[in-house]
Image: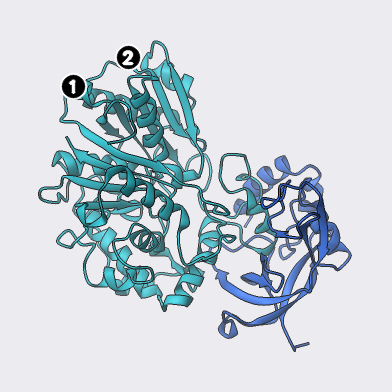
Amino acid sequence: MFGAGRAVAIAGIGQTTYARRDERSESLLAAEATLAALRDAGVAPADVDGMITYTLDPVDEIGICRALGVRDLALTSRVPGGGAGALGTIHQAAAAVAAGACETVLVWRAINQGAAYRYGQPQAGGMFQPGSGTSSLLWCMPFGAQAPATWAALAIQRYMHEFGVTSRDFGRIAVLHRKHAATNPAAIFHGKPITLDEHQASRWIVEPVLRLLDCCQENAGAAAAVITTLERARDLRQRPVQILAAAQSIPAEAEVISNYYHADLTTMPEAMGVAKRLWAQSGLAPRDMHAALLYDAFTPNVMKQLEAFGFCEHGEAKGFVADGHCELSGSIPTNTHGGHSGEAYIHGMNLVTEGVRQLRGTAANQVAGAQLVLVSSGMAGAILAKA
Amino acid sequence: MAVHVRPLCAKWCTYVPGARASFHAMTAAARPDPIVTADNAFFWEACARGELVAQRCGACGAFAHPPRPMCPRCHSTQREVARLSGRGEVWSWIVPRHPAPIGFAEAPVVALIALDEGVRLVSNVVGVAPEAMRNGLRVEVAFEATAGGKAVPVFRAMGRG
């Protein structure tokens, strides 16, 4: 059980439509997704008393309060680390409710990347604010490392070098995501699977690491969840999903994306730290999980998390994926909604919504008998359980 | 190209006082200036003198990069600027193809350099074609000018030109 306090659950989830382009503002997307989550739970918006989102989220808490008609917030917080911190919202919500600091927490992420700004473009100043988790990006800029794919690829190349991993190996993750997205009606790439040859024919974004089809896409949408006590959730509209364990990890010298200064660049120490805490809190092991939802800004992140959480050994993810372990029929069905590169890039919050659907038994690509799901955004994670 | 440049300019110019003038003086192929802060100014000032340096603890001698206000080993705030050999090896390398990095006529080889003193530095390898790049390549420092007349360290394969 999470912590020493009250048992905590996700009582509701909500999302907007996901699309490459959307006219709606990020505040409207956030309002629609949070209202959908509250209606899903059967909780009156006025009763929300906690709000937690990302430091990067552009939507103001007070704005959401005004839109939803929230009466009186008892707690707000924001989690650093960009999308990698996504599950930190669940971690903090669970901690706050378990401790009794508040009763009903709304978490969300709203994103409209095409309208206000162009995502993934070269930039020189916009991402150095405290809380982004990327303060050393200024050491990259004058050298032409000016965009997320470039920053990420520079560390990933070392992993390829040491373990003989190729672009084809990453391509298998891209194919898996698009296969799952193809049968997920909410996915941006619904009905659009790809082949490994198509992945290999897609242009280089960063040579020799990331092709176009390794990358999450620029898109718009919002997703949200409602966290409350397990006891209260049992009286609400949906069957609750318990937050069995939740954790964050920012190890020494680890950063979100300009992550070049920790000892072994072939590992993901932040995910290893999350894994250590989640397995310790829950008393569970990788073999106990029925599905894994792993953050993918880029396909290699999925392989490094499979290793960090112990689903396979360090350096063995390429064979593990090629052998079909991550398929719906495999030993650990992974990113069953299509991941960020297939469903939508809602910066990790759509890993939470899919985890809940799997445990309710309502996922588009349902894993039969799913009871326990690992959700990881890299620097934070949770184990969700059917309650 | 202008579509890409304008939002960058807006952000950059907001963040870095005085950047507007140097940005608009740039040609299409001029390398961006370093972003200078109170904690890293010593590094870029040394580059302007043609020296590669790193922060070193004045009490225990540990190198630290990126620089920081205090030594994480002994918590001393005595920070020394230590001149480095300028030699090291390529730890990892990539070529950003799309979108094209701003300020480069051709896609640069971006590399993480493991310096012999034990610190890693993001930089460029120049004078080596992408096809000839490899991990472990021994390199030594050189300096290149930026759009606004500053200097940044880049690396060449050792034993050449």
- The residue that appears at 13% across and 42% down in the rendered structure is A361
Letter of the chain that mark 1 sits on in the rendering: A
Task: Give the labeled residue for mark 2.
Answer: A47
Q: Which mark is residue A236?
A: 1
Quarter occupied by residue A296: bottom left
Quarter occupied by residue A108: top left
Is disc 2 placed on a helix, strand or loop?
A: helix
The image quadrant where one finds the C terminus of chain A is top left
Chain B shade in the render: blue
- Going by the numbered disc 2, the residue's amino acid type is Asp
Residue A383 versus residue B62: which sits nearer the camera? B62
Residue A311, position as x, y percentages in the image: 28, 61
For this view, does A157 lie left or right of residue B57?
A: left
Residue A338, position as x, y percentages in the image: 27, 54
Chain A shade in the render: cyan
For residue A46, say whether it is visible: yes
- Residue A325 vs A182, above or below: the answer is below
Number of numbered discs overlaid on the protein picture: 2
